[in-house]
Every structure is written in structure tokens, then in C-alpha cells.
Image (cartoon, coloured by chain):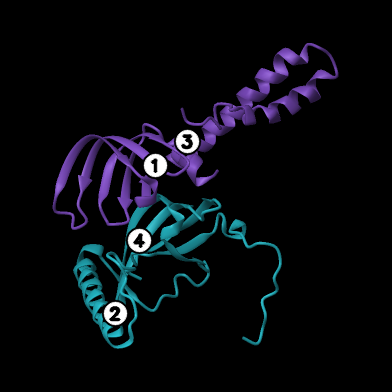
Amino acid sequence: MLPLSLLNAAQNKPMLVELKNGETFNGHLVNCDNFMNITLREVYQTNPEGDRFWKLKECYIRGSTIKYLRVPDPLLDLVKDEQTRAREAGRSARGGPGGGRGRGAPPRGRGAARGGPIRGGRGRGRGG
Amino acid sequence: MDSLIPFTTSGSLVDCVDRKMLVVLRDGRKLQGVLRSYDQFANLVLEDTVERIYHQDVFAELKRGLFLIRGENVVLLGEIDLDQEDDVPLRQVDWAVLEPYHRQEIIDKKHRDEAKAQILYERKGFCKEGGEGDGY
């Protein structure tokens, strides 16, 4: 899955963000966008030398200032499972009611399921 | 160069996915991890990442977990040969032991680079890097 989709899926998870200047921000991800701009809550900010600290209720970080983000290890598997579950749910939701219409329906069901994610199924949602 | 690399279709990182890679960042950090995904900006997802520092004939490692690296901060990406990766002719020590030496090396390097940049600027008219330079 794409790096930014991983980020979208990390909403409400704790993470560490290091900026290009070496400052670090530890907090929970509230939201993010395609530019990697993010908002965090319950943030602990540290200066580059590591000797000064601030606590912020929330903060906004412009994507272009980010060097990297560190996220919880289980997140990757968690997101992959969520995606599979969302895909299965989408498939059965379309195949189910459509299946009763007869032989022609199942192929249509599968085709519609492929169209589903584009319309913004749960796994591929815009993270809103 | 005698050998010309044939110009085929655009290059991609698809062959590097699910492989153990070395990533060098612009701040000089050297990370090793399994590349799980990338995008058009070469933003990377690196799993089971380990950061390594080196000093003379010694190195130290620290487990760092799951990384999302913004592509513009990457200097290079290299595939690690799993057969050879343990043939390192260096001794491993604890991170806490090596860290002060590594930190000092960075400071010394910074001074050397600043001195070089100053000389090039004064004598040859080269422009100096603004603010944060590259640490690698």
C-alpha cells in the first residue's frame, strides 16, 4: 500500500515526526492530506538538541518540513487486514443483493465490486 | 563511461519492494529495513528499520521500527545482499557506548565542511549553503 495511504490509516495512532531541522513531535495523528500536512494532538515537542521540551494540545505540521515519521510497528499489518476486510465487505455487499437476480448477476457483482473502491469504499476512503 | 546503460522505460523501485535496503538520509543517518512501499515522490515505507552508526572499526545498531520517509530526504537506496550482510569486518558495540564518538565525528565533519565552504567562497567565489546543509 502507498506510503500516504499508510499515513491516512494511522489516524488516531501515536507517532513520532522528525522535521528537517531535527525537532521531534510525539503525538496522535488527527488528520493528514496528500501534501503530508498533518495535525497532531497531545503533542510533546523536543528541540533538535534534545534538551528542551514543550507540550502542545494540538499542532499543525506542514508536510514539506517533515523528514520522516515513525509509526507503531503493528500498523502495517493492521492496515493490510483492514483493507482486506473492507474489500471483502464491499464484494459481498454488491454480490449479495445482486446475486438473487440470476446467472448474469454474479459477474456484474464482481465488476461492481472493482468499481466500488474508486467510489471510496472504507479501505480507500479519503481518511475523513 | 565505456558501457552505456540502455535507456528502457522509466526506472522504478518495484524491484526493491520486500527487500532489505540501505537508506542514507540527507542528515547522514544510515537506516536498514525492508522496503514495503513507495510512491511517485520516492516516499518510502521501511519496516523493521535499524539505524546504524559507525566509528573507525566499530559499529552500533538501534532498532527503530516502522518508518515513513519523505522522499526528498533520501540520498540513496541500496539493496543489501543477505548472503554478505554479516561479513562486516567491524566489531559491534552498544549504542550508548559509541554514540558520543559518533556525535563528535558529526561535529568535526561540520567544522571541516564549513571551513572548506568558506575557503571556496573566499578564493573561488563558490556559493555557501544556506542554513542547514547536508550531513552525509
Give the residue drawn at x 29%, y 79%.
Answer: B117
Q: Which mark is residue B67?
A: none
Task: Tell me if A37 is positioned left or right of B16 in this view.
Answer: left
Contact flag, marks 2 and 1 (Cβ < 8 Å) = no
What chain letter is assigned to the residue under label 3?
A
Identify the residue under disc 1: A37
- For mark 3, give the secondary structure: helix
Label 1 in the same subunit as label 3: yes
Q: Amino acid at mark 3?
A: Leu
Give the residue drawn at x 49%, y 56%.
Answer: B34
Identify the residue under disc 3: A78
Q: Earlier in the sequence, mark 4 or mark 2?
A: 4
Chain A: colour as depicted:
purple
Q: CA distance from mark 2 to mark 1?
A: 34 Å
Q: In this view of the protein, which residue sits in the foreground, A56 or A112?
A: A56
Q: Amino acid at mark 4?
A: Glu
For label 1, count other residues whose C-alpha is less than 10 Å away and answer few (under 14), some (14-19) or many (20+): some
Image spot of residue B102 (x, y percent): 24, 71
Image spot of residue A114 (x, y percent): 70, 30
Q: Earlier in the sequence, mark 1 or mark 3?
A: 1
Residue B1, quarter of the rendered image = bottom right
- For mark 1, give the secondary structure: loop
Q: Amino acid at mark 2?
A: Ala
Image spot of residue A51 (x, y percent): 14, 53
